[in-house]
């Protein structure tokens, strides 16, 4: 059941060692001189990837071409990669609870508030668009834990670093893959307590139940797992995005997506396809609106 | 003759997970449920745990390190359910 996850080797995972050194260096820089001082470093790193990481560049070009309807220029791809580098670095600030350098704008907080107050528990579904960390750090629901569910095996070193930076957050990470029974029992128990479980739906990972959906003029694989999870446990689903707007703003959005996911037995596949398509359409809208926030640097439209 | 717990479990697995083309009797009692064998995944695990709770009143706990052993095969699952049910009877009396 780890097949899908293993294929999703982003350049972040592959060059983990170098990235880790870079992150440490940038963080030391940031600690002494502040976030602004890291900008030249981010620019150099991004330029390096723009010049030498052909896989990331290819993925960026393909995405930007689909969004803009024309071949993207050198600088457009560079800016795309730089946004990713910046948001990755910002993650460290956010993990340490250092929200000072940032401005957060929030929309849709009230939806989450309502579910939390009712103690119902909910599934927060994101995508690799913008900063997922910002959503948490922005304090959408300070008093209720958000448990992040996902595969963290193939970025072990980076996550070890992140865990050290924020042990409190590490306690709220649910690692998929080792023991499905315990993982799912834990997800259910947390939701039963009225807590929130967050996961990403634009890569196949929760299991191998990939669903193909139309996406930016092509067809891509999305995860069916999050919707099955919501259906089985009868929990509402909210979409969450943390869109980065330079130089220092994060737009946190929470949108009601499905009060109840119903997948009738007789037409389960069909119903699943429909809801995944609706998710894919919304992700496409967000990605069109803020293309540089698209952080899937691999061939997203590859055949299954 | 009453149905064995193992047979009831096999039926429950097929019904809960809507395994088309699988006859309950064709599931081997000692074969692994996850990975190779029947090839169940995490959503299956969740549905199965819920079904076992409603059918046998046995709860799967989130912090039990032996969950993997319990859910290894129909045989281990039946042993787990028997043990939990016995425990509940003892505590109840």
Image (cartoon, coloured by chain):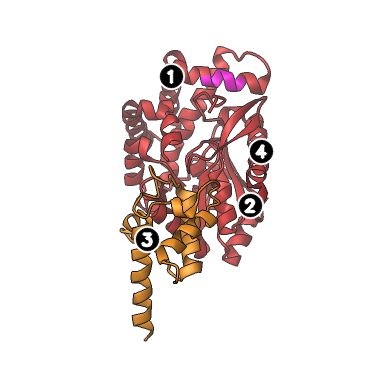
- The quarter of the picture where residue A46 lies is top left
Foreground: disc 4 or disc 2: 2
Q: Is residue A203 above or below residue B53?
A: above
Residue A265, label in figure:
2
Residue B77, label in figure:
3
- The quarter of the picture where residue A288 lies is top right
Residue A87 seen: yes
**SS class, disc 4:** helix
Span of residues in magenta? A59-64
Outermost residue toward the front in this view: B1
Which colour denotes chain A? red
- The quarter of the picture where residue A243 lies is top right
Residues under labels 4 and 2: Cα distance? 19 Å
The lab-note entry on whether marks 4 and 2 share a chain reads yes
The lab-note entry on whether marks 2 and 1 share a chain reads yes
Residues under labels 4 and 3: Cα distance? 37 Å
Residue A277, label in figure:
4
The lab-note entry on whether marks 4 and 3 share a chain reads no
**Mark 2–mark 3 CB contact (< 8 Å):** no
């Amino acid at each position: 059941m780890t097949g899908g996850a293993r294929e999703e080797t982003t350049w972040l995972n592959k060059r983990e060692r170098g990235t880790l050194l870079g992150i440490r260096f940038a963080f030391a820089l940031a600690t002494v001189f502040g976030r602004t001082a890291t900008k030249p470093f981010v620019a150099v790193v991004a330029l390096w990837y723009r010049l030498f990481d052909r896989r990331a560049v290819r993925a960026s070009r393909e995405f930007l071409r689909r969004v803009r309807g024309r071949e993207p220029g050198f600088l457009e791809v560079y800016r795309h990669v730089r946004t990713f580098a910046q948001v990755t670095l910002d993650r460290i600030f956010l993990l340490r609870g250092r929200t000072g350098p940032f401005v957060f704008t929030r929309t849709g907080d009230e939806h989450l508030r309502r579910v939390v107050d009712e103690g119902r528990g909910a599934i927060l579904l994101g995508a690799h668009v913008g900063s997922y960390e910002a959503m948490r750090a922005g304090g959408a629901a300070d008093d209720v834990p958000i448990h992040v569910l996902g595969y963290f095996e193939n970025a072990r070193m980076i996550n070890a670093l992140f865990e050290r930076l924020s042990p409190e957050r590490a306690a709220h990470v649910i690692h998929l893959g080792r023991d499905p029974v315990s993982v799912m029992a834990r997800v259910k128990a947390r939701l039963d307590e009225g807590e929130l479980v967050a996961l990403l739906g634009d890569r196949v990972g929760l299991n191998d139940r990939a669903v193909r959906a139309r996406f930016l003029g092509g067809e891509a694989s999305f995860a069916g797992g999050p919707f099955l999870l919501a259906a089985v446990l009868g929990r509402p689903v909210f979409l969450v995005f943390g869109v980065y707007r330079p130089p220092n703003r994060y737009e946190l959005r929470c949108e009601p997506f499905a009060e109840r996911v119903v997948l009738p037995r007789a037409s389960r596949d069909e119903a699943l396809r429909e809801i995944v398509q609706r998710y894919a359409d919304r992700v496409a809208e967000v990605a069109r609106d803020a293309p540089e926030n698209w952080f899937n640097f691999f061939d997203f439209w590859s055949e299954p | 003759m009453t149905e064995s717990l193992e047979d009831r479990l096999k039926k429950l697995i097929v019904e809960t997970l809507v395994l088309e083309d699988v006859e309950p009797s064709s599931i081997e009692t000692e074969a692994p449920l996850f990975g190779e064998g029947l090839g169940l995944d995490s959503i299956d695990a969740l549905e199965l745990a819920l079904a076992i709770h409603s059918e046998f009143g046995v709860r799967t706990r989130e912090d039990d390190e032996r969950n993997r052993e319990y859910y290894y095969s129909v045989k281990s699952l039946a042993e787990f359910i028997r043990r939990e049910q016995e425990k509940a009877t003892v505590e109840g009396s």
